[in-house]
Image: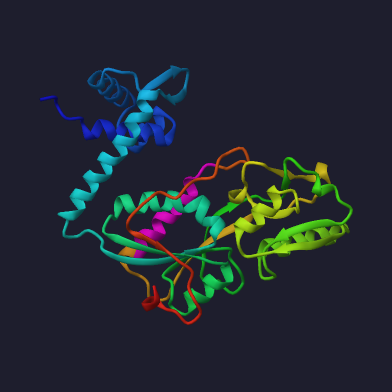
């Protein structure tokens, strides 16, 4: 019978892919760079194929490497799940987390991937709503953790990420050149809306609100269809959008801030673990550009997503 694959070698292989570098992978797995190279060489010898294309410092998977990556992640995940099942101190329970839908598409895959791998016996209950609604749910005890745009009413939130805020238009249309600028933006309590409208008022640019919605999908659709200009943070940029700068006659905007909020009396190990994973995930994310594809949420049995209805608490999930 063939010898089984070495999980330590697979862990190093995945670390190289995730960090994009043999050097950074060595730091991730606490090995020397030569030890990492040796593990990859032995793994390639074991499988009888090259896993990476050697072209300078760039790290690029071969077709075989891409196939192995899927199996490697599954094997490492199952290994961790097995160990957790026999660990009497493993974290169990459930956490109710809320975030706006545009944050969910960009940030949730990374947060979930980190947290679920480390805490396979914790159930995540997820709600997607506006910042104001999420703050209200936190205040009423309907959520344990929320990822929000910070505001004066949420002084006890913690800033975990800052990124550029942009005026954006369709790359295939010229709606931004219209004499009266049509806008597709969030509702009146949206911080991005206020900043964008105030900036246009300061430079005297005529504008009108064409679409108002709390749904990022609706706003994004209006922009991509060439119907309106919007104000979006870097995380919400999509293929087919173009950032409008000073050369286009649009003022610069202040950076958007992203904060994590915890409900009162939620100082438990499971919630503290999730907050720490959120910090790490958002700090490690690479910048996004309109040319990048949007991420898909990973499939998992442990996730339920729904909107909170007024008056519905934890029992209503």
**Picture residue at 52% right of the left edge, 50% below the top:** 106
> Relative to 193, is 54 on the left or the right?
left
> How far across and how far down the image is residue 144, in percent?
41, 70
Above or below: residue 29 compared with residue 85: above
Query: Residue 7 is drawn in which quadrant?
Result: top left
Q: Quadrant of the N terminus?
A: top left
- Residue farthest to the left, as pictured: 1
| Colouring scheme, one of rainbow, by chain, secondary structure, one colour | rainbow
> Relative to 307, is 302 on the left or the right?
left
> How far across and how far down the image is residue 172, in percent?
74, 40
Q: Is residue 280 magenta?
A: yes
- Residue farthest to the front, as pictured: 225
**Picture residue at 54% right of the left edge, 45% below the top:** 294
Q: Quadrant of the C terminus?
A: bottom left
Magenta stretch, overall SS: helix
> How far across and how far down the image is residue 20, in percent?
44, 32
Above or below: residue 248 compared with residue 193: above
Query: Residue 124 is drawn in which quadrant?
Result: bottom left
**Viewer-proximal residue, 249 or 183?**
183
**Viewer-proximal residue, 222 or 287?**
222
Residue span colored magenta: 271-286
Does any portion of residue 95 appear in the rendered image?
yes
Q: Is residue 175 magenta?
A: no
């Amino acid at each position: 019978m063939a010898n089984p694959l070495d999980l330590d070698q697979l862990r190093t292989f995945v670390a190289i892919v995730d960090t994009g570098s043999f050097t950074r992978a060595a730091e991730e797995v606490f090995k020397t760079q030569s030890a990492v190279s040796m593990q990859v060489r032995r793994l390639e010898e074991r499988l009888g194929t090259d896993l990476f294309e050697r072209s300078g410092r760039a790290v690029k998977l071969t077709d075989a490497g891409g196939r192995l990556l899927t199996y490697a992640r599954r094997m490492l995940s199952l290994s961790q799940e097995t160990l957790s099942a026999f660990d009497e101190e493993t974290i169990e329970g459930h956490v109710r987390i809320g975030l706006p839908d545009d944050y969910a598409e960009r940030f949730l895959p990374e947060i979930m991937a980190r947290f679920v791998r480390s805490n396979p016996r914790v159930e995540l209950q997820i709600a997607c709503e506006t910042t104001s609604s999420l703050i209200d749910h936190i205040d009423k005890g309907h959520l344990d953790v929320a990822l929000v745009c910070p505001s004066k009413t949420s002084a006890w939130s913690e800033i975990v990420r800052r990124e550029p805020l942009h005026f954006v238009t369709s790359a295939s249309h010229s709606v931004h050149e219209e004499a009266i600028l049509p806008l597709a933006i969030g509702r009146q309590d949206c911080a991005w809306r206020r900043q964008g409208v105030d900036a246009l008022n300061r430079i005297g640019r005529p504008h009108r609100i064409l679409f108002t919605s709390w749904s990022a999908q609706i706003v994004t659709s209006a922009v991509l269809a060439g119907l309106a200009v919007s104000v979006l943070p870097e995380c919400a940029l999509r293929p087919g959008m173009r950032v409008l700068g000073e050369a286009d006659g649009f003022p610069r905007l202040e950076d958007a801030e992203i904060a994590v909020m915890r409900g009162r009396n939620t100082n438990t190990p499971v919630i503290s673990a999730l907050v720490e994973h959120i910090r790490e995930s958002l700090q490690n994310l690479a910048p996004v550009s309109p040319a990048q594809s949007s991420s898909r949420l990973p499939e998992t049995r442990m996730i339920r997503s729904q909107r909170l209805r007024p008056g519905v608490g934890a029992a209503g999930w």
